[in-house]
């Protein structure tokens, strides 16, 4: 038990060690998420039930990114670090009072909002799913009301995440999404058969409870378990003023998703499920790579900027950006080459048929085009937040969200009115003669907006922080060349294994994709080794340090 507690309370130092720890748990969490999606696909198929399920998240998600942003760790960590200072007695009291005040204000506000939304949920349901019939809308209202518990629970967990990240307790922070998916899987297996999609929603609430409960012991151990207290208006106002730009930016992104879901609800049964399955699959590398590096870098970036160490601040951003690009480009290529094998292996069971597979695979390919851009956006946004600048990401995000909405209208218009464009998209993605292919314009528009978002942030970050492109140019070309070679080898072996394995079976298509991917990766690694790639050396050095055994690092007086 003592060893287990030591693991939970271990402090992890170093960008790569922390990022790889977070990445390892992100992999575990994403594996469970894929198991979750496989169970959902096999149990319900890409049909009406899952359309309702995924749509039911939209309003609670919107509340989460707006109201719960008040206690988001991305916003609160700099304020907490500032008050905690060197960790003397008076500073600890000030930091504890700040957390208590924030917790109290959050609970009061989100309960008030949740009650209002619960009352007007029928009105919101008509807006987010205009294509649903009466029965589907009634079920949507019921499930959405249950899911209103999620932003409350996850908001409190976010506040706990401020403590665990600030004290670099990345283990307990990283395991939270793991237990969240465990809860949902419990809901599918224990309640799904008897209660249908409603049983899965009960599992979501179980998972959200796990998410907050797993961090509570560590927060308590650090002496920062929040309690209700008098609200210090000036402190709350300070946090709110800082979080408003971030909140608006996130709200814009979620409004885009709500808009996309509303469009998909009128595209035929299963369109919402196809869009969400593809979106979830492309989120796997983003969570493992982009999120892990940006989260691991954020506390260090905030501390460096507060201390005025601009040189180290830029150095950490460049280092994280190099590795995000290095890891993401091969994933982009392999996801496009192996998309059918990935989707069929993960989701191809039960009621999820071959037509569903081809549509989701095509959506995955279109989403994957922007996976590098999405990872870079996460890092640059965290960099701006660490520097106390939330306005720049706000305007860029709003602009890119507008681009997504404009793009989807243009693309849908082209798809419906110009047969040549429609046939080109369907042919290149191998979905010709399938029904419902117009849903593919949604991930394509999403990728267009994401790439524009990354390009604008890149230009602005270079201007604001004197970031040199020379530090990333070599990494990009090495990774791009290695990825192209990797994809070529993987594609050739797909053709070879097509004559060896029976791809009409699970194991046949699994081994076809797995062996092709492994041989492609090996070829890419050899190619990069011959180029004497620096990132390969960095990875080997971090693994050589045994990041899972990193000793506790005592913070200096001016840290955390």
Image: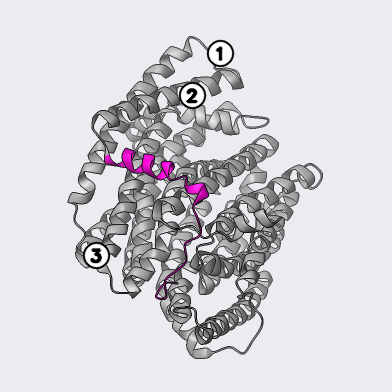
Residue 51 falls left or right of residue 437: right
Question: Is residue 537 located in the magenta-colored stretch of the structure?
Answer: yes
Q: Residue at x 59, y 20 (%)?
A: 507
Q: Position of residue 342 (x, y in %)?
A: 51, 31
Residue 397 in view (yes/no): no
Name above or below for residue 44 compared with residue 16.
above
Label 1, label 3: how many angstroms apart (C-alpha)? 56 Å
Label 1, label 2: how many angstroms apart (C-alpha)? 12 Å
Q: Which residue is mark 1?
A: 502
Q: Which residue is mark 2?
A: 513
Q: Nearer the viewer, mark 1 or mark 3?
A: 3
Q: Which residues are magenta?
A: 534-560
Q: Which residue is mark 3?
A: 311
The earlier-in-sequence mark between 1 and 2 is 1
Q: Nearer the viewer, residue 296 or 41?
A: 296
Question: Is residue 493 located in the magenta-colored stretch of the structure?
Answer: no
The earlier-in-sequence mark between 1 and 3 is 3
Q: Label 2: few (<14), some or many (≥20) within 10 Å? A: many
Q: How is the image coloured?
A: one colour
Q: Residue furthest top?
A: 499
Residues at discs 3 and 2 in contact (Cβ within 8 Å): no
Q: Residue at x 64, y 69 (%)?
A: 221
Residue 77 falls left or right of residue 128: left
Q: Name the image quarter holding the C terminus.
A: bottom left
Element type at mark 1: loop
Q: Position of residue 332 (x, y in %)?
A: 38, 38
- Residue 346 appears in which quarter of the rendering? top right
């Amino acid at each position: 038990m003592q060893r287990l507690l030591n693991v939970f309370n271990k402090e992890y130092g170093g960008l790569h060690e922390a990022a790889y720890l977070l990445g390892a748990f992100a992999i575990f969490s994403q594996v469970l998420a894929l198991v979750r999606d496989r169970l959902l696909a096999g149990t319900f198929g890409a049909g009406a039930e899952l359309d309702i399920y995924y749509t039911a998240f939209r309003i609670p998600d919107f509340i989460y990114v707006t109201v719960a942003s008040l206690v988001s760790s991305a916003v609160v960590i700099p304020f907490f670090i500032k008050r905690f200072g060197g960790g003397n007695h008076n500073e600890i009291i000030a930091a504890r009072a700040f957390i208590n005040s924030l917790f109290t204000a959050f609970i009061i506000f989100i309960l008030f909002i949740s009650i209002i939304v619960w009352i007007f949920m029928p009105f919101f349901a008509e807006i987010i799913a205009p294509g649903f019939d009466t029965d589907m809308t009634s079920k949507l209202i019921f499930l959405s009301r249950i899911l209103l518990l999620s932003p409350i629970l996850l908001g409190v967990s976010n506040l706990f995440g401020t403590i665990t990240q600030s004290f670099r307790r990345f283990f307990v922070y990283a395991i939270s999404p793991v237990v969240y998916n465990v809860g949902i899987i419990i809901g599918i297996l224990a309640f799904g058969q008897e209660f249908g999609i409603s049983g899965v929603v009960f599992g979501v609430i179980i998972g959200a409870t796990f998410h907050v409960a797993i961090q509570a012991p560590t927060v308590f151990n650090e002496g920062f378990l929040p309690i209700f207290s008098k609200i210090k208006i000036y402190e709350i106002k300070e946090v709110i003023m800082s979080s408003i730009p971030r909140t608006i930016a996130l709200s814009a992104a979620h409004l885009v998703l709500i808009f996309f879901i509303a469009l998909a609800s009128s595209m035929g049964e299963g369109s919402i499920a196809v869009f969400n399955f593809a979106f979830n699959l492309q989120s796997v590398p983003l969570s493992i790579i982009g999120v892990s590096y940006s989260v691991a870098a954020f506390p260090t970036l905030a501390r460096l900027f507060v201390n005025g160490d601009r040189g180290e601040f830029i150095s950490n951003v460049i280092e994280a950006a190099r590795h995000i690009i290095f890891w993401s480009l091969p994933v982009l290529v392999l996801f496009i080459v192996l998309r059918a094998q990935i989707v069929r292996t993960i989701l191809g069971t039960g009621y999820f048929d071959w037509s569903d597979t081809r549509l989701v695979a095509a959506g995955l390919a279109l989403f994957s085009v922007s996976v590098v851009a999405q990872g870079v956006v996460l890092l640059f946004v965290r960099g701006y937040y660490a520097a106390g600048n939330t306005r720049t990401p706000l305007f860029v995000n709003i602009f890119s969200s507008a681009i997504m909405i404009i793009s989807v209208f243009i693309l849908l218009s082209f798809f419906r009115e110009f047969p040549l464009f429609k046939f080109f998209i369907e042919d290149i993605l191998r979905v010709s003669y399938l029904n419902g292919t117009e849903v593919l314009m949604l991930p394509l528009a999403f990728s267009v907006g994401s790439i524009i978002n990354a390009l604008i942030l890149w230009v602005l970050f270079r201007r604001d922080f004197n970031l040199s492109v020379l530090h990333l140019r070599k990494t990009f070309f090495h990774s791009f060349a290695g990825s192209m070679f990797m994809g070529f080898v993987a594609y050739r072996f797909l053709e070879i294994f097509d004559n060896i394995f029976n791809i009409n079976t699970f194991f046949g298509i699994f081994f076809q994709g797995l062996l092709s991917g492994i041989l492609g990766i090996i070829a890419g690694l050899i190619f990069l080794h011959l180029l004497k790639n620096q990132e390969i050396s960095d990875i080997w050095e971090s693994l050589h340090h045994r990041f899972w055994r990193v000793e506790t690092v005592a913070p200096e007086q001016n840290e955390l």
